[in-house]
Amino acid sequence: MKKTYIAILTAAAGLCSCIEMMDSASQADVVNPLNVSFKVKAVTGFVDSDGNGTIDTNFPVEGLTVRFSNFEEDAVIETLTDENGIAQTEVAPGNYTISVFGESESEGNTYYLNGAVQNKAITKDITPEQAEASNDFSIAIRPAMVGPLCFSQIFYCGSTNPETQSTYFRDQFYEIYNNGDETYYLDHLCFAHLVPEFATATLPEWPAEDGLNNYVYAVTVWQLPGNGTDYPLKPGESFIITQEAANHADHSKYGGLIDTSLSEFETWAGNPQRVNPDVPDLEYVFWSGYIVTMQWLNTVSGPGLCIYQPGKHLEFPTINTGVLGETTQRQVGKTQEYVRISAEQLIDGVEMLPTSNSLNMKRIPGFVDAGAASTEEIYVGKSVCRKVIGQRPDGTPIYQDTNNSTEDFETQVPQFRRNGEKMPAWNWSLK
Amino acid sequence: MIKYSYIKLTGCLVAAALAPLCSSAQRINTEASVERLKSESLQFSYSDNASGIQLDQMDYYSQVGLGYDIEKGSFKRAQEGEHNTGYRFFTDGGGTMKALKGAFIWGSFEYSRDQLRDAEYNASLIDPLRGTPFFIADTYKSKWINQLYDMTVKAAAPKLWNRLIFGIEASYQNGQGAKQHDPRPLVSLSKFEIKPGVTVTLGKHAIGANYQYYSRREDGSAKNKISMSTNPVYIFNFPGFYVDASITSSTDDNERIYNANCMGVGGQYSFTTQKLRLLVSGKYTREVEDVTNSYTTPKMVGTTRDERWSIGLNAVYKPSKENTFFLNAAYGDRSIDGIQYVQEWDNSFEVAKWIIKSKSVRSNSSKAGFEGRLQYMRTTRGDSYNWTAGVEFSTEKLSDIYYFPRSTQDIENCTIGIFGRKNFIFNEKHSLLVGIRASYKMNNSSDIDYNGYKADTKCYTDFTLRDYYYLGSGYAAFGGEITYSFARLFKGRGSVFAAASGDYVRADDHRDLFDRRFYANFKIGLMF
């Protein structure tokens, strides 16, 4: 009898589930295209979590390109803003990443007005009046001057030994270039690996008090040494940070692709077994989570990286979990601490994703990088390299830097200083 | 494995167990006599209402056998294999059981194992042509190995108060499919179906109604056997509308869970006299299938709303003992709406799940068609027949639409065919059934208007467009079959048989894309 009751209850539950499913499907109507408007506004200062910030009228927002990208359908629709900064177009219902591109001249400087709103669900018409009135239908962009430093090449995806088919990632490296016209002193420059470590469409939630796009958050931070003028980087020079400075192409000892022993710095993760005495160690000043592996590497499927200048040597009470302080932050409901980096301190950032079609997994705010670079595959021995758009009289390259890595980067076989960049005079091999 | 063994054992026993309960009439079961038996049993062959089978007063038969199938050639849909082989074990049988006060019981079981070679554009489904527009595809030519267990039981109670009959049909299908090239999903399928029915007789007239429900679940996850490799895949929302993706060792969007429920109703009217038996039937079903991508944090990939209705007219006219005419006509319509969702990840700490913000029908795929057949059978030799011949005619109208950006595809075809079979009965034991058939398909019209974003990609030109050309391509087909039966076994009631059949199909249109396809089937078995 008990079995009969169980069978009846099971059948009833199954029937209810079936009816609910049928009913839910019945509620779907044939799609109608939506007429949407989106407002672009240039802001300055702190932007709260509702998108309210001080409108910066120095930067006209007419004629900016607004791109609606639906990565679940591979649909890309572009339009231009009108004199009120409003872009109008017709789209299908969906989740859109809305990106803004453009540049503006102010006080003799070129500013990029880049920004993006990710994974915005558009399910109804949006009128220009609604876009004007609501922060839900607007993008607050922060005009960014082109910084002198930029990542010119990043090799993160690793390589595969063609003979043994074994994979290798110890020769990951990051080349940073002075694309400006003046010498830049690298002392105190920080190199940060941003949160989340692995690209995901489900981004972490940060406290509302941090507002919108005022900060980025780092899981590890490395800092260059110096007292202010020890590490000059002249225009046309680049310096290289490598995971381990060694000749990884020597397959009698290593299994990699390239010789990174001429790097300016290698990363020190507390492991004395992995030190090249010739190459200075880059000190890690913050490491979120307990360091168990005594090694450091970036995910071969694509990290988010940035460089920023805090202007002083950073010190945290401890480098591991449990740090409290002004420069760290926790995700909502979590206990792990991450470094909080203000937007004003950022110099350059690059988003790298598993594929160029994974932009719905973007983790860096649009004003840092409106797009993403990708090698498309892992362990294929390719680096993402910034495109060359010109050359100085001394033969050094001028790189494209529009704060949109989708446009600014291409993939190449990794090679140090591939376009004739110069080595800084303080490289260990020149001393 | 224990479950499969149990199913297999049960299936094997179904036919054998029923035999002692059946009537003791000295019927001789051969390939031809069972074909005739099924053709004359209209309710059994053309109705979903098991209770109506009582009206057929169907004599019993049982068969068990092994079969081997071969398909080869380029005239095929892109997702079908270029060269397929498969073997199967099958058994079915039953009939009206006098020992059970005239109850009807019938059962079948089939195990099949198929190898599809050089199949393309499928990395998620055992049967990619079953109608869902939501699937994962890759461009590699891959082998698939599919195995299916299929078991069905039909039963009808004896007539109550000389007027009322209850019946039920139940079936269970279980299968697995495995792709043999990275990205390689291992897909599991199970389906349970039940169709209770009732029939009321009013003299020569009878009316019946039945209900239908099934639940089907199919799930699998595409993974790479070669670690650290990356394989491009394409996540389809509809043919021609997909997004590029890749399967890597860390991909978390490679799982597909298809969960379908279907409900339907059917109605039947039949009229029976000495010379004429008529069955008019109609049915409507509605299947809803949700597709999600995870068990733990499910995100809706899409939903299909699949509605089918059909009406049929089937008749057997027997003006004399030697002459029988069969008429089968049916018109059916199937419409599949593809529903897509707008979802947001709610990452607040307490919730953390996908929230549906809106849903809308983004595509529709429909098929409407008529099928008719007129057949004559000369029946002067016992339960079997001397010869039979007939003509067939069918039309189909295929319409696909993706609403935004609006893209359409429309195809209209018609097919005519003829067939004939001669049963050479040499003596009481030896007989040879020889059949030939031919058909010709013509395309009446076809049109495609694609406004999607993928017109220059391989997935469009080599898959969607090639499929469009295939569906609208005319062909000429002919084939034949030969079956040898050795009868008078098992107290004179049974026979052993060996059969072979082959068909050759040659494309008439788009000869630059398609050539021909050859089908062959061999089987041996036992009937009793």
Image (tube, rainbow, N blue to C red):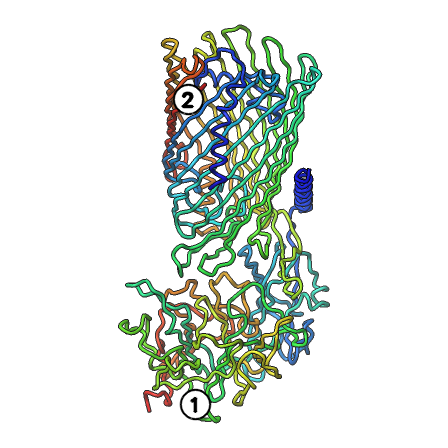
- Marks 1 and 2 sit apart, C-alpha to C-alpha, by 90 Å
Say whether residue B1 is left or right of residue A68. left
Q: Which residue is mark 2?
A: B526
Query: How many labels, in total?
Result: 2
Q: At x 53% / y 72%, what residue is drawn? A: A369
In the rendered image, is residue B388 in sight? no
Q: Residues within 10 Å of mark 2 (few under 14, many from 20)?
A: many
Q: Chain of mark 2?
A: B
Q: Nearer the viewer, residue A421 or A354?
A: A354
In the rendered image, which quarter is residue B204 located in? top right
Q: Residue furthest front?
A: A1
A153 w.r.t. B371: above or below = below
In the rendered image, which quarter is residue B158 located in? top right
* Residue mark closest to the camera, 1 vs 2: 2
Q: Position of residue B81 (x, y in %)?
A: 40, 40
**Tag shown at residue B528:** none
A333 w.r.t. B2: above or below = below
Q: Which residue is mark 1?
A: A231
Q: Position of residue B6 (x, y in %)?
A: 49, 36
Say whether residue B350 is left or right of residue B408. right
Q: Secondary structure at mark 2?
A: strand
Q: Looking at numbered disc 2 in the image, what kind of residue is underneath it?
A: Leu
Q: Residues within 10 Å of mark 1 (few under 14, many from 20)?
A: many
Q: Position of residue B448 (x, y in %)?
A: 51, 42
Q: Secondary structure at mark 1?
A: loop
In the rendered image, which quarter is residue B364 located in? top right
Q: Looking at numbered disc 1 in the image, what kind of residue is underneath it?
A: Tyr
- Marks 1,2: beta carbons within 8 A: no
Q: Position of residue A405 (x, y in %)?
A: 49, 70
